[in-house]
Image (cartoon, rainbow, N blue to C red):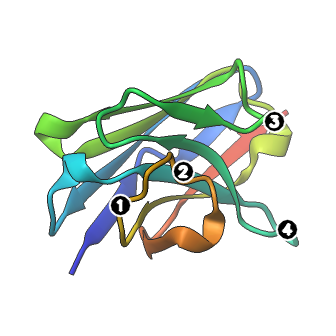
Amino acid sequence: QVQLVESGGGLVQAGGSLRLSCAASGRTFSSYDMGWFRQAPGKERYLIAAISGSGGTTYLADSVKGRFTISRDNAKNTAYLQMNSLKPEDTAVYYCAAPRFRFRELVTDTTLYTYWGQGTQVTVSS
């Protein structure tokens, strides 16, 4: 029943920025963590950012720390991923996701994310 829809992907030059959005529906948005994943060709999908329901706790993978920022606007049922200083190696399909259940701590285990958006392509050219 939960639906997640990403938008904001596209083609950008190295050093540029993109802002991805994830619109959620189907349940109480503010009660659940949200995560952003990416999958490059030939690579496994992995978590790059996560944010708690309230927005008070965040996680960033080392590969994007200092360049990406995760945020959310619960009034709009939307999570965001601001991507700055993009590199060609950031090229991937980006997915937003949400866990089915609430947990005591921020969800960083990929297997616990059960609701997924369709993905949006981000291509960074050199």
Image quadrant occupied by the N terminus: bottom left
What amino acid is at disc 2?
Trp
- Discs 3, 1 touching: Cβ within 8 Å: no
Which SS class for mark 4? Answer: loop
**Which residue in the protein does label 2 denote?**
36
Residue neighbourhood size for the residue with mark 4, other residues' Cα within 10 Å, grouped as few (<14), some (14–19), many (≥20): few
Q: Which mark is residue 43?
A: 4
Cβ–Cβ under 8 Å for marks 3 and 4: no
Q: Which residue is painted at 50% across and 68% down in the image? A: 113
- Residue type at numbered disc 1: Arg
Q: Which one is earlier in the sequence, the residue at label 2 or at label 1?
A: 2
Cα separation between marks 3 and 1: 27 Å
**Residue 9 location in percent, x, y?**
51, 47
Cα gap from disc 2 to disc 3, whole angstroms: 13 Å
Residue depth check, mark 2 versus mark 4: number of the one nearer the observer: 2
Q: Earlier in the sequence, mark 2 or mark 4?
A: 2
Badge 4 amino acid:
Lys
